[in-house]
Structures are given as C-alpha cells and as structure tokens.
Image: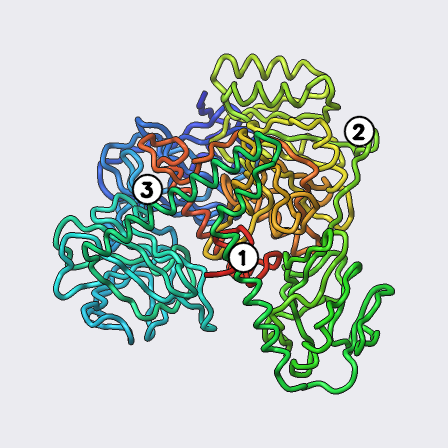
Amino acid sequence: MARSSPDAAAALAAFGGTARLDGAVVADGEVLDFAPRAGFVVVRVALAPGCWRLRLTLADPAALRVDALTGDGPIPLPVPAVAKVVEARFALSAPLDAIRLAPVKAARLKIVAFSVEPAPAWASLLPDWRMGPVALPPRQAGEASPETEVAGRRPPGWDEAITIDAVEAVRIAGTRFEVEEAGAVRLAFAPPLRPGLWSFAVKALTEDGAPALVEPRILAQGAASPLDTAAILRPVAGALHRGVVRLDRPTPVVVLRPRTQSGVVDLRELRVRRLSPWGRIRLVVRLAGEAVGRRLLMATSRLATSRGGGLEAVARLATPADRRHRRGRGEERAALARWLARPVMREGPVRVATSGTVPLPAGAVAADAAPADVTLRPGERLTEPAVEAIRRAPPGPVSADAAWRVLGLSSSPERFAAPDPIRQRAGGGPLPLAADGAAGGTHIPFVLVERRGGVSVAAPAVRPSTARPPVSLITPTRDAPHHLARFLATLFAPSADPPELILVDNGSRDARALRLLEEAAARPEVTLIRDDRPFNFAALSNLGAAAARGDILIFANNDIAFTDPAAIDRLAVAAARPQVGVAGARLLYPDGRVQHAGLVLAGEARVRHLERFLSGRAGGYMGRQRIATSVSAVTGALMALRAELFFALGGFDAARYPVLYNDIDLCLRVRERGLANCLVPSATAVHHESVSIGQQPSDALFSRGGAIWRWARAVEAERFRMDWGPVLDLDPCYPSAFDPLEAAFVTRR
C-alpha cells in the first residue's frame, strides 16, 4: 500500500507533494531506504496525450526501473542502466495518472530533482516501439533524426537503380557503414519496385575483408516496430547475403538496417532483382526441400531416440550439414597441402614450450616459454605436419587450431588466442596461440595441436553424493504450477539427495502454485523468499544467492526436470574444480532431442545453441555430447559455479541484463579471469522449454514475444553488443573454419 507521512516530506520534496511511498520504503531524513525485496515510489502526474520527457536527478548513480502505470498495466520507460541523471522520452495516446520508480536492488537513494515536461515529437526512419498507450523512440541513446544531405548518393558497385535517400544514426564512407544503435538507411529506387517478389543480395564484410557475421534487415511496409522485418538477408555463400521481399504495391523506397546492433559493416554490390515466374518456382522448390529436410531430420532423430539409437546413421545421412562438413574436411586437407608447398621461412628446429614431458615430433625441440615458437598446454601434443607447417610461417609466434582426439577421432573444437584477456586459458601462464596478426603472430589455419582424453576440462568422475560439495540450488519462479510441480517432484524424488533449495517467488497469484510453494517451504532444506517487484530474473537470482549457504551455487529454471538423480552431483563436482568457472548441464527436450549443449557466440548480439535438435542418444561432433567440453558460455537454465567466484564477480548484472543475456555476460566475465566454462554432458536434465519459443510475435502486451518483451530484448541486445562486441565476432571456443550461425560444426558456406 502506497503511503506518505510527515517523516517522508524531506525525502519526497523533489516531487512537490505528488509522491507516495510503498510500505517497504523507509524515509531517513532526505534519503529513501529501499528494502532488498520490494519498495517503490508512486508519483502522481496528470499527463495528456502527447510527447513527454521525464528527468530524475539523484545524489549518486543508481540503477532504476521507471514504469508508466497505465490502464493496461505497468509499462517500462527507457532509462539508462546506471545513471545519476535519469532521462526518458515517451509519447502517450491516452492520459497518464501515475509513474512508478523503483531501484533494481536494495539501495539508499537521495532524489534531488524530478520533472516531467512536454517534449518535441521525434522523427525517425524507423517506427516507434508501441506498447499499449505508450510509444517509445526507436533508440535509447541520443536523438538522431533522418539526414537527407546524402540523398542521391550511390555506394560504389551498387545497382544503378538504387540510391541512398536518407540515413539515421549511420555514417557512410564509400561502402563502409558505421552503424549506431538502431541505425537505418532509406533506399530509393528509380523506377519504383513493382508489386511481386524481389531478391535483395549484398556482400557483407568486416573492415578486414572477411565475411561479416551480420544479418541486414529490410523493414516491412507499414512496420509496427523497429524489428518488424520483411526480409532478413542471411548468409548463403561466404560474404554473400540474400533475402526475398514480397511487395504488394509500387514501392519507391525501403528502409534497410545494415546491421541490428552498433558496429561497422562493409556492404558491397547490393543487387535487387525481381523474381521471374521460373525464379519463384525455384524458390518454392528450395524452401519446400528445406522444410522436408528439416522434418525428415526431426523424424529420424526422434525415431532413433525412441528405438535405442539404431537409426542415428540414417539421421546423419539425411543431414545436408553433415555432407558439407565432410566436404569441408577435404577442403581443409587440400589447403594444408598447399601450405606445405610454400618455401621454408624458418631455419633450425621448431622451439616448443610445454608444462611437462611431451613427446615431440622430429624437427622440434623443447624450449622456454619466452623464445618459443609455440606453447602447449598440459595434455597437448603437436600433430605430424605441425613442424613443417610452422617452418613455412614467418618468424615470430604462431597460432593454429587445436583438436581433441577421442577414440582415434580428431576435431578442432577450440581455438585459443592472445592477447585478448577473454581468451586466456585457465591458470594464466603462456598462451598457446596468438590472434591473427596480433603482436607479430601468424595464424596457421589448420589442426596442428591435439589433446588426448578430452579438452581443457575432463569429464568428472561419478562420485557418491556424500562427496558432493555443499550445494545451494536457486530457482526464481512465478505461477506456472505445472512446471513447478514437476520440478519439485523430480528434485525431491525418493532416490535423489536434494541440496538446499532457495525458491524466489516473484508475485505468484495462482492458487495451486501458492500451495506448492507453501508445501515446499515446510521442508527443512527449502527456503522461500518472496519478491513482488517487476520481473528481473538477474535480481531474483542474486537475491536467492545472497540467502544461500552452499559452497556451490546451482541456478535452475522452474521448468527443469531432474530425470537423473546424479546430475546435480556431477554438475557440482565439475564446478568445484579450481580451473573451472561456470559448469553447464546438457539439457534435452521432452522428446529426447538436445536443447542445450553449450553456446556459441555468432556475431551481432546473437548466441546459438550448439547441436540443437540433435538426437539425445547421438555422440555429437567427435563425441562432444559425451565428454566435458570447453565452451564460451552455457545457459542459465541449469548452471553451477563456486559461491566465492559468483560474489567476487558481483553476481548477475541486474541493471544491464534484467531478463536476457545475464547468464552469458556472467560466463564471459568468468573467462576474463582466465577460467574455463564447460559443458558437463554427464549432468543431463530435461528442459520443458517450448521447441518454438523465441521471438514469436504475440498480441499479448506482457507475454513472452509481446511488444514489451521484444523491446526489452532489443535494449539488452544493444548493451550486450557494446559490452562484448569483439568477442561475439570470433568465439574463442569454436573452430574458425565452422559456421557459428548454424552452430552444428559445419564448414562455412
């Protein structure tokens, strides 16, 4: 219940008598003391339809959430993640009576000034974010508006019928596009494009001339949001990206987003062609073939799972990606042969630094780390062609792809590079490889190093539950009684040894869910915390971690089913190892297919699940579904790490990533400390996430896939790109020769 009192007058003076406090907020002189689990300030306003600017000044920087309390419900306003001066622009289509302010976590705030004043309407090439009666500008940062000085410009090599009509938050030099948040370009066509199907094709490259991991977007006619897309230009071969747009009326201009998040991309040879009847037939046949192929792969994968894996070979033969992989391996061998035909550039033996006794091939000698040509980690050895390949590289440190060898098979699942700290290996010390061109190093793009018995983190042995370190399992939850009931039943199964469980309830209202929570709270190993603040998964998880007593923290979604009683033990044992940062479980869909087996960074702000939809009985690429594997990140749906490490990192970043990306951000911060994140396939559970979940548009304002969710995802994605851009473009734990967008260990097309 909101309240006000004479004691709060000083603390609320900035609001001019229009504010009320929630019961969980205490006024201490001029300071407002917000409790850890709840508390907000409600400010009465009388805003008519139109554009407005909110401005809030604090004595010290803080992370706030600001909501417009509309008749449809609380709608978030765009504010900085952490700031001393908080500003937000918004437009109203209906009167607004109140605004709610709340810190992201427990805080003592002194509010210096508050105002909401009329603001000029913004102009943009992009549509607004519309959420009920509230409209938000297409970008948070800055107030860029369309620039028409570039009208009539045509980048070199583009179709003569295409010119640039206007740009917004984009700087263009030749074919180089420097894109800021929600940058857009309006393209003009002379003559206008006629109704029908049109193919858009462009070559997208990095500043170094390599294929760029971007997906330019053509906005839909009459787009309802900045992400309402008519076509995404996806990579089809190398740097070439292509997409098809259907136009239902003559179209003189379209809006192009050169890339979804901030960054630079070189767009060359933009071509627009109207599909002929024969072209349409080919397109329909190709799409139908892809759909049939996907259905065949899913069907054979499910059949293989249900019949003990006997048909897995059929599933592999039905996979076009597998054929591309085999072709790619042949191309790699041919490329290595061409490399070995180069002249020798180094005289004398190859100097190899190792941390132990490792057999060296002929032509190699042991050396100290400093003058070494290449440095090996424990368990690594040079392959047979390594010496001759290194002798044909220019003087200086070299880098190469590393491989594991399992049952006589080899792969190249991880590429380590320096000096970027995100790519440092566990324990510090000499790094095995140098990044391309970094510090005079040369990258040899072949597998020259192999490891035996797995990768940087070996699979933990199955231990009795008594050997498990003290564990606290933390689960935020809200309603969803069917998920919660299954989660609790499998966790507390008679054969299981349940750990301490911290349930953080975020305002459940469902009667059955409340009953389940009360029944669980009656158990001695369960702690129930209630937090009714607006949903912030990172803050809820941090709150649960603060109440935990275990040495190992395991974060689990409430839609997890623990089908293997030993999964928690194995995950905890892996996370307890000093060289490990975050340990992630392998997760299956209810039908037995793989949902999560590690994550790969795939450019922009994209993250892909490795080998998703693979049969759960399959061994995966070179056995990675059976052995612990070093990966850049794992999903927060079921992850574990040491409590001391979690708190040293400051927990999940609840200010910048309240809903999405918080788990990946944590994993990348762990890697900055030189620790390895690993997938632990021996810890397997079932994840009842919908197979089709994702950015599926929804008309429900507050649902996943609804307008608020899509806006929040775009905001967090931009922050994620700004924080981790260089790492996203080259995942240090995924082979550079493979396509991270497919995330299936297949060669780039």
Query: Where residue 65 appears, x then y in whole percent?
Result: 45, 38
Q: Amino acid at mark 1?
A: His
Nearer the observer, disc 2 or disc 3?
A: 2
Q: Which mark, by number, is residue 465? A: 2
Nearer the observer, disc 3 or disc 1?
A: 1
Quarter of the C terminus within the rendering: bottom left
Taking the image as shown, residue 153 lies to the left or right of residue 325, namely: left
| N-terminal-most mark, 2 or 1 | 1
Q: Residue at x 51, y 26 (%)?
A: 532
Q: Residues within 10 Å of mark 1 (few under 14, many from 20)?
A: some
Distance, label 2 to label 3, CA atoms, is 58 Å
Q: Residue at x 67, y 86 (%)?
A: 345
Taking the image as shown, residue 108 lies to the left or right of residue 234, namely: right
Q: Residues within 10 Å of mark 2 (few under 14, many from 20)?
A: some
Q: Amino acid at mark 2?
A: Ser
Looking at the image, do the residues carrying marks 3 and 1 touch, with CB atoms under 8 Å apart?
Answer: no
Quarter of the N terminus within the rendering: top left
Quadrant location of residue 474? Answer: top right
| N-terminal-most mark, 2 or 3 | 3
Residue marked by disc 1: 325
**Farthest right residue in view:** 357
Query: Where residue 708 appears, x then y in whole percent?
Result: 37, 37
Q: Which mark, by number, is residue 645? A: none
Q: Residue at x 73, y 48 (%)?
A: 580
Q: Which mark, by number, is residue 116? A: 3
Quadrant location of residue 339? Answer: bottom right
Q: Amino acid at mark 3?
A: Val
Taking the image as shown, residue 51 lies to the left or right of residue 57, namely: left
Nearest the camera: 688 or 255? 688
